[in-house]
Image (tube, rainbow, N blue to C red):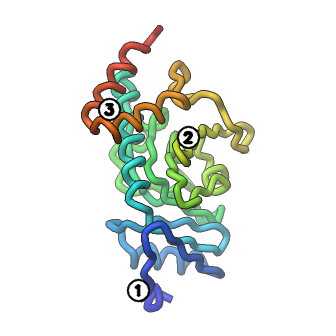
Amino acid sequence: MLLELKRITVPAGQKILLEDVSWGEFEAILEELGEHRAARIAYDFGILEIMTPLPEHEIDKIYISNFVEILLEELDIEFCPLGSTTFKNQLMSKGIEPDNCFYIRNEARVRGKNRLDLTVDPPPDLALEIDITSRTHPNIYQTLGVPELWQFEKGKLKILVLVNRKYVESASSPNFPDFPLIEVIPQYLDLCKTEGRNKGIKAFRAWVKENINI
């Protein structure tokens, strides 16, 4: 399978599915693909998906990640961003690579760790998925116990919160309950794209400062 995998090219915005992939094969494929790659993977009970994002997917990911970091910085909350780290749990037969993720409440529990194992370590507190290519897999995040998942699709932000082991859509973020992010993040994302990254980021930071403890 690894030899065949090397011959596969996944165009940007496209994905391939491999069926009947054992956990051992999944681990071997991850090793073969390496960490520094454009493709993202998802594994769910023997089905492996490999997807290569579109350029606009990456742009939205970076800006929305910047917004999350600004919120955490201005609120003086320690956090650990782990990007597209592979999160997996063999006992659950699940694996996923978010577009970005953050340890916030559990930051101290993973501080300084180079490798994470979700059979013993907590999942990230917040995961981001940019859904331009319909890639998101909320069922995997849900099973892995990720408390909060942001999905951004077609200019709209959706916040999913884990309640009794199931995701429910929420009007606000548990990590940032005092901020109307569903309305505001798309506005500042558009500002970054139309007026420039620096102007948009500075404006968002100013907005956060103005709205702290209002």
Disc 1 marks a residue whose amino acid type is Lys
Q: Which mark is residue 200?
A: 3
Q: Quadrant of residue 207?
A: top left
144 or 209: which is nearer to us? Answer: 209
Crowding at mark 2 (Cα within 10 Å: few <14, some 14-19, many 20+):
few
Q: Between marks 3 and 1, how big is the CA–CA gap? A: 40 Å
Q: Earlier in the sequence, mark 2 or mark 3?
A: 2
Residue under pointer 1: 6
Crowding at mark 1 (Cα within 10 Å: few <14, some 14-19, many 20+):
few
Relative to 72, residue 54 above or below: below
- Judged from the image, the secondary structure of the residue bearing numbered disc 1 is helix
Relative to 212, residue 17 above or below: below
Disc 2 marks a residue whose amino acid type is Lys
Coordinates of residue 95 in the picture (x, y in percent): 56, 63
Q: Earlier in the sequence, mark 3 or mark 1?
A: 1
- Judged from the image, the secondary structure of the residue bearing numbered disc 3 is helix
Q: Is residue 31 left or right of residue 41?
A: left
Q: Which mark is residue 156?
A: 2
* Residue at image coords 51%, 26%: 176
Coordinates of residue 165 in the picture (x, y in percent): 72, 44
Q: Earlier in the sequence, mark 2 or mark 1?
A: 1
128 or 118: which is nearer to us? Answer: 128
Disc 3 marks a residue whose amino acid type is Gly
- Judged from the image, the secondary structure of the residue bearing numbered disc 2 is strand
* Residue at image coords 51%, 41%: 126
Residue most extreme to the left: 198
